[in-house]
Amino acid sequence: MYYEYCGIRYAVPVRFRSPKPPPTHSDIYKANSSSVLCPQFPCTDPLAAFSDNEDCLVLNIFTPTTFNSTYPVMVFLHGGGFGVGTGSPVIYNPQFFLAHDVIIVTLNYRLNVYGFLNLGIRDAPGNAGLKDIRAALRWIQENISEFNGDPDNVTVFGQGSGGIAALYLTLSESTKGLCHKIISESGVLFSPHSFDSDPLKTASHVARSLEINTTNRKRLFDVYTNNTLLAIEEAISKQMNAQTVFVPSVEKIFDGEEAFLCDTPYNILSDTNNKAFNPVPLIIGLNTIEGLTSILDYNTMSSFTDRLKHGDNKVLDQRSLHVPEKDLEKFRSKIRETYFKDFDKESDIVSGFINLNSDFCYVGPMSLLADIYVNNSNIPVYRYIFNYIGDRNLGRILTNVSLEATTNTDELFYLFDSERFELALNEEDARMVNFMTTMWTNFAKTGDPTPDKENGQWFPHPDVLAIDMEPMYVEPLTPTRAQFWRESYLKYGAELPNFVSSI
């Protein structure tokens, strides 16, 4: 049993900018709205649904039924590539956590163009979605004690882009003290999904689907302000990798707008004197073949396959890399040689597509992030690979694969229950639910996922724990290909000082 308070307004959105404080109430506020979503386009992602509701900045609080102590607070950020998704308990029911004496908060933040349009002007400075999360954490600091929560013990955890957003909280001076521990599931920095070094180019590119060809900032602002929400979302949905078109970026500083990200993640993490870096204890991990679920984006996969088969190597370019023209064909050939040696059959191209997405969006960036974070903070980082295969592995169910491997979202529903999906819970699944929620809540309470060493110990980085019915330490995923990504990134990374464009 637990209490739930759903649909609490923590802020009021201002289009493309930081939100305003929520309204006050003199009467009783009915916190019973469990299905609020921020604007997002229709897509095949089962963790999302179409919405055109801009007044969507709500959070949901779930508490134990006893009030005889103060509880640690765990704030969950949903995934969806910064383009779709929701914190609704219809999808993320936190009942498994509540047996461990914690308070769970889930929330919405603005997505796609409404959350991340950055035109380098005061009216569209960027990162509104991250500023929403900041506003929610400030609301929690001020109010969670009324629900018997401890504002001095807040853990932010998220999956996918939610995990990336959680990591961004360590890269902003404006969020210091708002969270004390972070868990990032399948969310890493330095990937094409996590950062846009040229947001003006992105906004201009999407505007072409609205039949506007311009890089003029004022003209683009008019395009995104005056077109209907439905027209803009349709334009986004036509893009390759539509869920991750608009993502975080570096902001200019404007009077009257509190910036969130003032430098690149790489620069902030790499400079031990950078005041924006405020590291906290961290759990971070992956599934074994994260890119497997990329085949569910039929538009992107079919476009990629068709272009590659017809010799269009431009489709191999990555937003996270800026390769000079003189090196471009050689680098594309190297990617093709590494991932697409044999592509007489479409299945070979699909396999290469999966591996490329796994390495460039997850495995390689994870390797670099863990090293930099630990080396520049001396704070423990606990790494995992989720290996367990049961009846609640949503990614495997959706992709309908027979591979003995886990993929994106497979760990999620060993943490949450869901009204959206009918997922079985056999005896082994129940043991995994208890194992996962125990480690996550131990970490939230103490900063250590295994504080009772008599029952086993999870050692921090460089060790990597395989989460399965019999946990064991393993080597990192695909080390050779991860090294190829690291070498490529350190040479051509779009975030690196020589390549970052100026908005």
Image: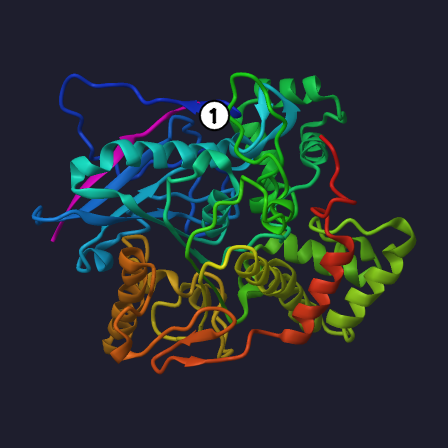
Instruction: Give the side of residue 224 with respect to residue 338, left or right.
Output: left
From this view, report whether residue 76 is shown above or below residue 27. below
Q: Residue furthest right?
A: 326
Quarter of image, res 388: bottom left
Q: Nearer the viewer, residue 398 or 408?
A: 408
Q: Main secondary structure of the magenta part?
A: strand
**Magenta stretch holds residue 323:** no
From this view, report whether residue 391 is shown above or below residue 141. below
Residue 383 place in picture, x, y as percent: 46, 67
Image: magenta residue range: 1-13
Q: Amino acid at mark 1?
A: Ser
Residue 79 place in picture, x, y as percent: 45, 49
Q: Which residue is mark 1?
A: 18
Q: Nearer the viewer, residue 420 or 465?
A: 465
Residue pictured at 43% horizontal, 44% vertical: 85
Residue 485 place in picture, x, y as percent: 70, 64
Is residue 349 at least partly visible in the picture?
Answer: yes
Q: Nearer the viewer, residue 180 or 23?
A: 180
Residue pictured at 23% horizontal, 60% vertical: 96
